[in-house]
Image: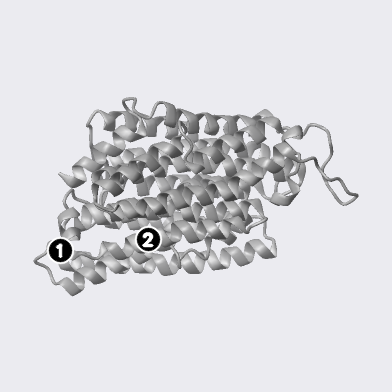
Amino acid sequence: MCATVAGMALWLAARAADGAVYEVHLLQLTPQIWMFFRVDAMGALFGATVAVLWLLGLVYSWGYMADGHRPTRYYSFFMLCLGWTMGVAYAGNLLTFLIFYELFSILTYPLVVHEETPEAMAAGTKYIIYILVGGTLVLLGIVLTFSLAGDQTLTQGGILTAEMDTAWLLTILCCFLTGFGVKAALMPLHGWVPDAHPAAPAPFSAVLSGVMVAVGTFGMMRVMFQVFGVELLQEMHVLHYLTWIASFTVIFAAILAVNQDDLKRRLAYSTISQMAYVTLGISLLGIESTVGALVHITNHAFMKGALFLCAGLFIKRLGVRRVSQLDGAAKRMPITAAAFTIAALGMIGTPPLSGFVSKWYLGLGMLDTGNPALLAVLLGGALMAAIYLLPVGYRMYFRDPVLTSEDRISIEGREAPASMLVPLIVSTVITAALGLAAAAPGMPVALARMAAETFFH
């Protein structure tokens, strides 16, 4: 089923690249409100990203969960979350978006607490509190939008206008940005991420970090460009606050990542920093920066997915989860160590990998919108990414393991079986291909540009 969803999502993305837009009214809830799906360029790109990464996570799970805790429950919620996330990608109005957004957010909880350890249960409690508060704010924003505009269809150019009451417009915008900011892990709304990512099983951590956090930024885009519209946002003159918050998040989350010895926790803070790039890009209201933001969602998904899959292999095969325990890991797991290194270089923004492409467009957008000072944020975030990721590679390749009686590692080869190694290799190859073939027709850059041009023209 997951493979079928991925195939359909890729087909829709290919059709969207040719300019096709698909709409279907699924269910009439009230005389004024339909459950409505619309596949446009932005939704097609996000849907394809979700479906492909989910498929890789599912295949990886076959090996990871072979002797795991309650696998039937795990797979059931894993697949349910896929369905609801695809609904978010293809939602054609705010109510449809909210239904699927809330369902997938709530159904994520059993996966966060799946291991049922005290740490997992505490992380799940924190997660559900954050998510319910954020979802309530999104619901309030939708209700206020409908009462003000009499509509909640996601429309190019927006459904709100400058003639409406300014105080209400600001209230609606604050509700949406704060509500989606919880899922996007913008500081100070990020508290659930560093606990939920380490607690969840590694294959779901890859999905959680790769696309589920991105749902928050995706929701911001839908609201900013298809509820408010570029012209109204420019007239409101308030998005510079969002720019400052996103810039702070990029740098400060990266600083916090440096001090984390738990590898999954370090990668969780990295996700907070990297997703803030997306928010930063859309807050500038420029075509190039929006292209960079959209592309970075996809590129980050596969880079961070590969890193979390590597972390899962270190846990399963070596019995270690701390950076300080990874000395000499490349000698025992050479393929995993190589995949981690490639994905880490992509995350830093090393050409010609995919991370460089999205950050290049973000940099162009900063110059085009007259914000050259923000290049310091872009470069500073890349530098901090190097500081928290490269030492992991250094330990794996240039240090010898220190073995004690308490270690659960050995000097024998511990490379993973094919069911876990193939998804990691595929995600790493995608990380390279999205950089090397970025300019090819039908690639994420083309879809992102098509979406951005509809927003700004």
| Residue 272 horizontal side relative to residue 176, left or right | right
At 33% from the left and 41% from the top, the residue drawn is 361
At 62% from the left and 47% from the top, the residue drawn is 202
Q: Residues within 10 Å of mark 2 (few under 14, many from 20)?
A: many
| Residue 180: x %, y % from top left | 37, 60
User: In the rendered image of this protein, does residue 140 appear above or below residue 281?
Assistant: below
| Residue 282: image tag | none
Look at the numbered disc 2 and give the secondary structure of its residue.
helix
Q: Amino acid at mark 2?
A: Phe
Residue 189 visible at all: yes
Q: Amino acid at mark 1?
A: Ala
Q: Quadrant of residue 283?
A: bottom left
| Residue 306: x %, y % from top left | 56, 39
Q: Nearer the viewer, residue 231 or 120?
A: 231
Q: Which residue is mark 1?
A: 149
Q: Nearer the viewer, residue 299 or 362?
A: 362
User: In the rendered image of this protein, does residue 260 appear above or below residue 391?
Assistant: below
| Residue 180: image tag | 2
Q: Nearer the viewer, residue 337 or 117?
A: 337
Q: Quadrant of residue 184?
A: bottom left
| Residue 455 horizontal side relative to residue 343, left or right | left
At 67% from the left and 56% from the top, the residue drawn is 261
Q: Earlier in the sequence, mark 1 or mark 2?
A: 1
Residue 80 visible at all: no
Q: How is the image coloured?
A: one colour
User: In the rendered image of this protein, does residue 123 appear above or below residue 20?
Assistant: below
| Residue 264: x %, y % from top left | 62, 52
Quarter occupied by the C terminus: top left
Most extreme residue toward the bottom is 167
User: In the rendered image of this protein, does residue 435 appear above or below residue 46?
Assistant: above
